[in-house]
Image (tube, rainbow, N blue to C red):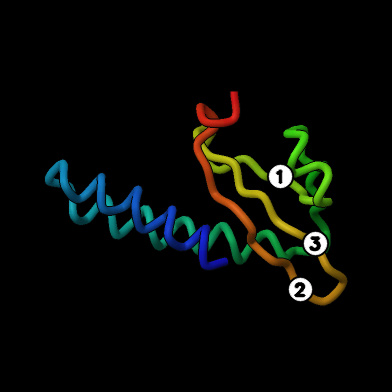
Amino acid sequence: MDHAAEEVAYIAYFIESKGLPQTAKKFIDDSFAFFNRLSDTQIKHKSCGYDIWKGQGYRCASYKRKYVVAYLDKEDEIIICDFVSYKLLL
């Protein structure tokens, strides 16, 4: 989760640098709330299509149609591995 947390912080810092501190805080709060919802056992996301992540067994979830959350789905926990912009995967 450390790498994903760093990416969220980096994006929030960028938003804040544009003069939108409340929006940056909301982005952080919403991102971590989304991460928590990934542990819902009723929802299973598909395996990642990105070859490197597919080889590592990651599942992918879209966040706000701009970002991808790659995570490992264990029986008793999820491990957030990456949080990146879709643009970086193309």
Real-space Cα separation, disc 1 to disc 3, in angstroms = 10 Å
Say which residue label 2 marks.
77
Residue type for callout 3: Asp
Local SS, label 3: strand
Left/right placement of residue 79 relative to residue 49 reads left
Mark seen at residue 60:
1
**Looking at the image, do the residues carrying marks 1 and 3 touch, with CB atoms under 8 Å apart?**
no
Q: Nearer the viewer, residue 42 or 7?
A: 7
Look at 83% across and 68% down and name the residue there. 74
x and y percent of residue 81 in the render? 64, 58
Residue type for callout 2: Glu
x and y percent of residue 26 in the render? 33, 56
Q: Nearer the viewer, residue 62 or 43?
A: 62
Quarter of the image where the N terminus is located: bottom right
- Classify residue 43 by image quadrant: bottom right
- Pointer 2 local density, CA inside 10 Å: few below 14, some 14–19, many at least 20: few
Left/right placement of residue 29 relative to residue 68 reads left
Work out which residue is located at the far right of the displayed protein and give it: 75
Real-space Cα separation, disc 2 to disc 1, in angstroms = 15 Å
Residue type for callout 1: Cys
Q: How many marks?
A: 3
Quarter of the image where the C terminus is located: top right
Work out which residue is located at the far top of the displayed protein and give it: 90
Q: Nearer the viewer, residue 43 or 5?
A: 5
Of the two numbered discs 2 and 1 on the same chain, state the one appearing first in sequence: 1
Local SS, label 1: strand
Look at 45% across and 57% down and name the residue there. 30
Real-space Cα separation, disc 3 to disc 2, in angstroms = 7 Å
Say which residue label 3 marks.
73
x and y percent of residue 27 in the render? 37, 53
Look at 74% across and 44% down and name the residue there. 53
